[in-house]
Structure formats: structure tokens, C-alpha cells
Amino acid sequence: MGRVVDWSGGFWERRYSAEPVLDDEALVGRLRYVLAHGVKEGLVERSAEWPGLTCLSQLLGPARRLFQWFSWTKRWSKRRREDLEAGEGRFAEEIAEPVELVVEPLPCWKGLGEEERRRAVRGWVEAVESEARARDTPVMGARAVRAQHPHTRPEHLKRSPRPLGHASTRQALRELREQYRTFVAAFREAATRWMRGDFSAPFPLYSFPPRVVPSPLIRIL
């Protein structure tokens, strides 16, 4: 994608991270956050007007959607330099494959009927759009969004630290923070023993020993 828009360096500014969602209320809140994209920033007036990728149509209609995946493996296997150099060769129909994307209901909504889920989504969208109208700020509009150059940057960038997790109560977040501190302490203790050559040191679940040769082995080598 960076090649397509002549973007140099990493495409994303920060590395990917996955924060745990601790309860159903917080999970629904994450969905609301996704549905507010474009509206809360004043880019479009309505969620359905967002010209970029969105799952709203699948949440309100058929859950399945067909996309085109351009297989660059096929493209390179042709070994035709003139095709590789041509810009349109990157998105030639002959290397396109159909890919079906299916949006699954939230786990906490599994027991709801299809119309109940759609009604809940419509309620969230209406609330997001109502809050945006109440701010009474200018809206760019979908056409202006499309006209933006890919390298355009806002005058003021919003920077905030990644949250440790998402929860509907502060108590749940405090417990998560304490669990994480316990995890880090156990890992550091095991890592210290590992570096001293004690390979029996138990590392906490979902962690891995350091990718460093322990000091006793260094002396032997």
C-alpha cells in the first residue's frame, strides 16, 4: 500500500498491540468506538457516508461481503519484467482472487436475534451522529475526504498512550494492572535465573525465555 501512495518508511507509526477487553459492556463500547469513526472527527456527518472501509453495511445487512485479493505471488511467478514494472500490473484482473469476509456477531450478542442486533447497531449509530450534531462543528464531507492527498497530515496530532485494557469499571482495570505487575515480576525473576544458567526456572504462562545465551554458556564457549 505504501508503494501505491508513494509512502516512505513504515506505513503505521506504532507497532501493533492487542489490549484485552474485560467485560461485555466494554466490548460493546469498542464496537461503538468503531462505528463513530469518521463522524466523531468531523469528516462525515453520518456513519454510512464514510468512504473508506467499514463494517456498517454488514452489521445492518448481509454479514458476508466479497472482496478482491490481488495475489502478488501469482504476479511474481509470471517472471515478466515488463508486467512487473507496469503500475497496472499490481492490480491486474488476472491475478485477482475473490475473498469472502464474514462479520461474526459479538460473543455477548450470540443469543440475540438478527433484527435485535441490527436494532442495537442502529441505536449506537444514531447516538454517535446525534452527539456530533450537538457539537455544531463544520463537517468536511465524503467528497472532500476522497480528495485528500494520502500524505496530508493534521495540524495537531492527538497522541495518547495505549491503554492497558478496556473495562466498564475502574476496579476491573486495577485488578488487571495488578495481574500484569505480578506477571512482570515473575518473568524478571525467571529471566534472572535463566541468565545464570538455571534452565529449570519456570516462566509465567504465555511468556518465553530471553533470546540471549546465558552467561555460563558464554564462558564455556
Image: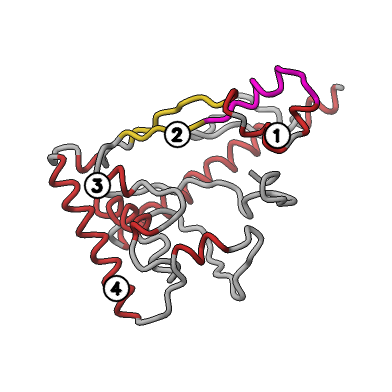
Disc 4/disc 1 C-alpha distance (Å): 55 Å
* Mark 2 residue type: Phe
- At x 48% / y 51%, what residue is drawn? 181
Which residue carries the number 1 mark?
195
Disc 4/disc 2 C-alpha distance (Å): 33 Å
| Image coords of residue 111 (percent x, y) | 14, 38
- At x 28% / y 59%, what residue is drawn? 168
Q: Nearer the viewer, mark 3 or mark 4?
A: 3
In the structure shown, which secondary structural element does the residue marked by tag 4 occupy? helix
In the structure shown, which secondary structural element does the residue marked by tag 2 occupy? strand
Disc 3/disc 2 C-alpha distance (Å): 18 Å
| Image coords of residue 46 (percent x, y) | 33, 64
Q: Are marks 3 and 1 in contact (CB under 8 Å)?
A: no
* Mark 3 residue type: Leu
Magenta segment range? Answer: 69-81
Disc 3/disc 4 C-alpha distance (Å): 21 Å
Q: Which mark is residue 58?
A: none
In the structure shown, which secondary structural element does the residue marked by tag 1 occupy? helix
Q: Which mark is residue 67?
A: 2
Which residue carries the number 3 mark?
60
Q: Earlier in the sequence, mark 3 or mark 1?
A: 3
Disc 2/disc 1 C-alpha distance (Å): 49 Å
Q: Earlier in the sequence, mark 3 or mark 2?
A: 3
Quarter of the figure with the C terminus: top right
Q: Earlier in the sequence, mark 4 or mark 2?
A: 2
Which residue carries the number 4 mark?
131
Q: Are marks 3 and 4 in contact (CB under 8 Å)?
A: no
Mark 4 Cα-neighbour bin, 10 Å: few <14, some 14–19, many ≥20? few
- At x 36% / y 35%, what residue is drawn? 65
Q: Are marks 4 and 1 in contact (CB under 8 Å)?
A: no
Quarter of the figure with the N terminus: top right
Q: Residue furthest bottom?
A: 136
